[in-house]
Image (tube, rainbow, N blue to C red):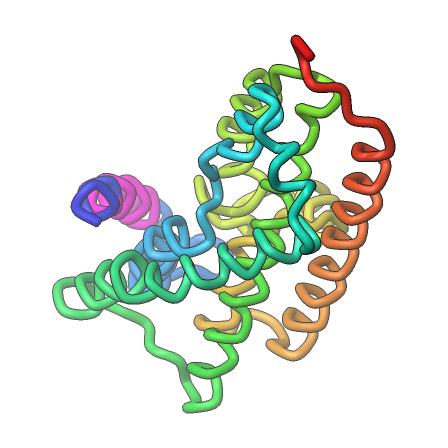
């Protein structure tokens, strides 16, 4: 949490400096909106666990995943349930504190209507599911790659930019914005922030997120079924 706050301060300084140089507004972001974007983003980062732990991939590498596959459960469903439980704890320890910090010490753009608060929570939960779906696909790539650390590192480097963590997606050129919103990446981080700020239609954003959640989970399910048709443990 402390690290999140420190990086949040650095991001606020850079964004506010850019906004001041642009006469106080870029795209649909004012200074207050930029502060809100940063502190919600810093909180969501730990809540959705964008960069993951690569734990499942390591279990595939070591062969320990065979124990998981023997258990009478659906591996993807079990890990998703575990991640939602982790998210519940992270909501209290990682999401709420940076938001409260930003609300108390910086100009903050609160939702214009009360309904945006519960919609934001629903959006954040769907974002957690989509983030899990991405992390699950990266982890089970180890069934083919054996060592997926290259793919994992590429995701860590690129996801922040694609999901709207580095800068708001509305800062991008128009053609880049249109292309990105055709992908699931903005649904992971930018969409919940837009719901909170009132940027765009919240219902459309939630439906878009729900669509990508179903698609990503379905791809993960099919990929896992393909991966476990024949499992060979190294060394035995």
Q: Residue at x 68, y 38 (%)?
A: 137
The answer to whether residue 20 is magenta is yes
Range drawn in magenta: 8-21
Query: Where, by quadrant of the figure, is residue 18 drawn?
Result: top left
Q: Residue at x 55, y 49 (%)?
A: 169
Q: Residue at x 54, y 70 (%)?
A: 123
Q: Position of residue 164 (x, y in %)?
A: 51, 47
The answer to whether residue 118 is magenta is no
Residue 77 visible to the viewer: yes
Q: Nearer the viewer, residue 65 or 131?
A: 65
Q: Position of residue 161 (x, y in %)?
A: 52, 37
Q: Is residue 98 above or below residue 7?
A: below
Q: Position of residue 214 (x, y in %)?
A: 75, 61
Q: Residue furthest bottom?
A: 114
Q: Residue furthest top?
A: 235
Q: Quadrant of the C terminus?
A: top right
Q: Is residue 120 above or below residue 175?
A: below
Number of marks in the image? 0
Q: Residue at x 55, y 18 (%)?
A: 149
Give the side of residue 44 with respect to residue 156, left or right.
Answer: left
Query: Taken as a whole, is the magenta stretch helix, strand or loop?
Result: helix
Q: Position of residue 139 (x, y in %)?
A: 61, 33
Q: Nearer the viewer, residue 108 or 136?
A: 136
Residue 24 visible to the viewer: no
Q: Nearer the viewer, residue 160 or 174?
A: 160
């Amino acid at each position: 949490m402390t690290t999140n706050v420190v990086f949040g301060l650095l991001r606020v300084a850079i964004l506010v400096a850019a906004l001041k140089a642009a006469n106080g507004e870029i795209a649909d972001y004012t200074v207050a909106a930029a502060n809100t974007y940063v502190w919600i983003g810093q909180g969501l980062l730990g809540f959705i666990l964008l960069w993951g732990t690569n734990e499942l991939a390591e279990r595939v590498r070591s062969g320990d995943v065979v124990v998981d596959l023997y258990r009478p459960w659906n591996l993807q469903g079990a890990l998703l349930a575990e991640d939602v439980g982790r998210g519940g704890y992270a909501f209290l320890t990682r999401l709420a504190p940076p938001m409260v910090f930003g609300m108390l010490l910086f100009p903050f753009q609160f939702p214009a209507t009360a309904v945006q608060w519960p919609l934001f929570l629903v959006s954040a939960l769907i974002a957690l599911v989509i983030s899990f779906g991405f992390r699950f696909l990266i982890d089970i790539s180890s069934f083919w790659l054996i060592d997926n650390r290259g793919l994992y590192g590429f995701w860590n480097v690129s996801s922040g930019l694609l999901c709207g963590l580095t800068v708001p997606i509305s800062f991008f050129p128009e053609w880049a914005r249109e292309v990105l919103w055709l992908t699931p990446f903005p649904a992971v981080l930018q969409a919940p922030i837009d719901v909170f700020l009132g940027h765009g239609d919240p219902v459309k954003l939630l439906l878009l997120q729900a669509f990508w959640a179903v698609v990503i989970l379905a791809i993960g399910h099919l990929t896992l079924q393909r991966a476990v048709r024949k499992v060979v443990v190294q060394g035995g």
